[in-house]
Image (tube, helix red, strand yellow):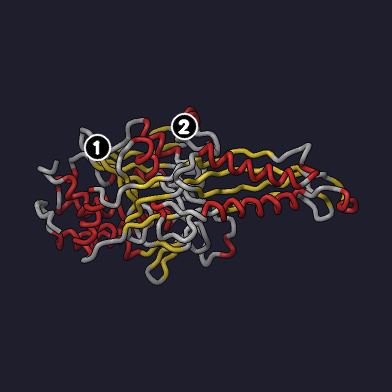
Amino acid sequence: LTRTSTPLDADALDRRVDDLSESAFAFLERLVAAPSVVGREAAAQDIVADELARLGFAVERLPIDETIADDPAAGVPQIAYDGRFDVIGRRGIGHTRLLINGHVDVVPASEPDLWSTAPFEPARRDGWLIGRGAGDMKGGFAMATLAFEALADVAPWTQTTDVSFVSVIEEECTGNGTLSAALAGVLGDEVVLTEPTGLDLLIAGVGIAWFDVTIPGTAGHAESADRSFNPVDGAIELVAELRELEREMNAHVEPAMDGIAHPYNVNVGTVEAGDWPSSVPALARLGIRVGHPTSWNASEIERRVRGAVNDVVRRVPALRDRPPEVRPSGFRAEGYAIDPAHPLVRDLSISHAHAHGSHPVAIAMGSTTDARIYVNRFGIPAICYGPRSRNIHGVDEAVELASIQAGAKTLARFIASRLAPGER
Ligand SMILES: [Zn+2]
């Protein structure tokens, strides 16, 4: 805890964070109320753009070109990019030293009746804000804007120096929003992504690949089901085969994932088949997400999944003439890790300790973030640090409001130290 050169009145900063937090929570509520699922991100991006403009950033909307799909680090686009965009907020006129990244896209909430509040009508309860995207990761937007606003009075030099905020789309399916912005030059010497880490430091993620697998059946009346092939039975066989792949992957956990018992999860996320109880379905389609070791690239995991499908075909005579189709359908993300001893990890940890009296933990997770794009593709250190969340991607997703304030106190200290006059 020796970085004392920064002329920052820490008590004044913390008071400003507390005083301004209600305004940040109101911004978060507006943002959660904009249901920014894939393809419908524009309204949420406009809310972010307005907030960044209010805080004195020069705001730009950056379209995403369809050719992004050709990039080796890209995922398979979900839908056309027409009318969809990243938002950039810039300060200063030079080279960006520090880039803050957040993703505005959220996963769907298709079972609203299971929620205690409508997923896109945020509600506060016991210090938490409930709503789809509140945790992953609109709470992180509020944390970042709160940090910036609090710094305006207590560290005015941060208002004119080279820091940018990028609000991206498609973090939840491809990473193409971040990749597109980065290829357009929206980079920094260092990147902090305000993903929900529970105020720990997330420094590594596994590889992630999405596939659609379509299994053909012999469509017809259920009367002849014993002589037909039901593709749902094929889907069950395939899931068993994928569980075998999962066991194999988790038998040898790589060092970056140390401490996680089961980092490589195969998840069947969508199942579609049939339209009538008395009909044998013509098709069954599985949407699967495979977490895999960092040492495997996108081609290797595709080869393994095709291998699992081929094993099913060998066992099931009905599939020999008409094998299932395997299509990469989103993430083609390779694993990533940054050194726990890297100055970015060390200094953000110091800022947290200054604010909260003890150091956060450096963690890895069996998932990915857009940090991989900066680390793997551009060689730029990137780390995730953000609020405490619960039930992300689930029912009654929520963010703890106090952790937004706490994270803002850390981030503001870090920004002030990185942008202090005379630093670097
Ligand atoms: Zn996220």
Picture coordinates of residue 219, whole percent (x, y): 82, 45
Q: In the drawing, what numbered circle is on residue 72?
A: 2
| Amino acid bearing label 2 | Pro
Q: Is residue 352 left or right of residue 386?
A: left
Left or right, 90 with reference to 128: left
Going 77% across and 46% down the picture, which residue do you hit?
A: 316
Judge: label 1 CB < 8 Å from ligand 1: no
Image coords of residue 285 (percent x, y): 68, 46
Label at residue 260? none
Residue 13 visible in this rendered orientation of the protein = yes
Q: What quarter of the picture does the C terminus occupy?
A: top left
Q: Residue furthest bottom?
A: 126
Q: Is residue 42 visible?
A: no
> Which type of secondary structure does the marked residue at label 1 adopt?
loop
**Residue 295 shown left or right of residue 289 in the figure:** left
Task: Name the foreground residue: 106 vs 346.
Answer: 346
For image coordinates 16% across by 52% down, the residue present is 153
Disc 2 within 8 angstroms of ligand 1 (CB): no
Q: Nearer the viewer, residue 122 or 195?
A: 195
Query: Quarter-wise, where is residue 301 in the image?
Result: top right
Distance from disc 1 to disc 2, alpha carbons, whole Å, reads 25 Å
Residue at position x 55%, y 39% in the image: 78
Mark 1, Cα crowd under 10 Å, few <14 / some 14-19 / many 20+, is many
Q: Front-most of 114 and 174?
A: 174
| Residue at image coords 20%, 54% | 413
Which residue in the structure is indicated by mark 1? 96
Q: Residue furthest front?
A: 252
Q: What amino acid is at disc 1? A: Thr
Closer-to-camera residue (75/17) = 75
Q: Secondary structure at mark 2?
A: loop
Image quadrant where residue 8 sits: bottom left
